[in-house]
Amino acid sequence: MRYTFQDSNELSIQRDVIQDLQDFVDTSRKVLPIENASIENNADLISRRISLENGSEELEFINSKILDFIDSITGEVEEKDLLDYRNSILDACETSFNKSSGAMLSEIEIINKDIDGGLDDVEKQILSILNPFFEGGIYGITEKYFASMDRNVLRGKLTSTVVGMEYESELTFTDNTITIRGLYGTLFLPTWTRSGIIYKEDKVKLEDVSDLLLSSLDFDDHHISATFVNKKASKRLKVDMGEDALEIYYDGNEVTADPALMNSVKEEHVKSMLDALRNYIRSHVKKKTLVRLMLDGEDAIRNNQTFDCLKLIAEQFTEIINECIDRGYVDGEITIKIEQTDGTRTEKYVGKAELFDQLSEFGSEGLELASLLGVESS
């Protein structure tokens, strides 16, 4: 699939931008009412909690003042009847204070549980709605992949970041385990061995590491670190590769720091294997599930900041929308061409006015999104 502007130049983002825009509008239409309802529902609870917290503090202050007053006028009393009278008053104060304070704190705890329970439900709903769109409809992101074996099954995590927003997806893969052979082919690495009939001496030996299993992995566009082990975990291979450096550790040896071992390493094979590993992980994701949305390091959904995230996403569309319009032939129309693998070409478009009408249906928030997208009514 190939995506171009109307003038047949390739889109900088090889995506169906028109579909992504429509998905963004539909996602916003579904998410915003849920967040707004959550804010409204929690407003009364939060107001009641603040009132109780203030009341609890005031009760504690008054109780302290009363105890100080009683102590000031009875502190010198020594007669038993008066002491009994003093202590009965103190006991009554303590009982009354504990009862009232306990009731307030208990209600505060109930309110907190109600708020947390409501936010749990809201978070599940919003993450479920966002999940399909977040699988590819957000532009300008940087990604970092993680994977590790969990009870003999390879599981992963993908962290994506764009202008202060970070979201995390759990990954499951088409295969439960991955070997070097399965993702790349045959690979040999050197290790030291002692050999000789009469006199034992250390010699370099090449070993086939193709059947080692991937144990852990993390990578982004600039760095990759992968660890492989054999089934008995008696052999371990760790490879780190950055933009200018390659480090190999195998069978207890730091291979890249040992000239004798490194002479037997075909670096291009190791690098090709790591490239194949990157491609394998990206292309063999069976299921991607959005599990967290953060804004400036805080939970965006629980802090009612999903709309702020949608605004950041809208800003990522602005440049490509403007370019589509500038390279198009119809004023105010966002147009792209789609070329199928068999050579079939189709044209797809949406008008700025149409997008504006759709967004304006959900009030001031929709109008703000329209402005950020650059499709506001002129």
Image (cartoon, rainbow, N blue to C red):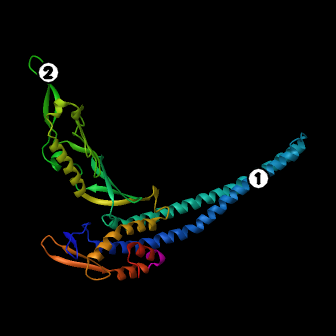
Q: Amino acid at mark 2?
A: Glu
Q: Residue 313, which numbered label?
A: none
Please name the residue that numbered disc 2 is placed on: 201
Which segment did they paint magenta?
Answer: 361-366
- Magenta region, main secondary structure: helix
Rendered-image quadrant of the N terminus: bottom left
Give x and y (percent) for residue 274.
Answer: 21, 47
Out of 94 and 351, give the one closest to the viewer: 351
Q: Position of residue 76 (x, y in %)?
A: 88, 41
- The structure residue drawn at horizontal position 63% and vertical position 62%, both measured from the top left corner, is 50
Q: Residues within 10 Å of mark 1 (few under 14, many from 20)?
A: some
Q: Nearer the viewer, residue 228 or 225?
A: 225
Is residue 175 shown to the viewer in this render?
no
- Residue 85, placed above or below residue 367: above
Report which residue position mark 1 lands on.
63
Q: Nearer the viewer, residue 92 or 192?
A: 192
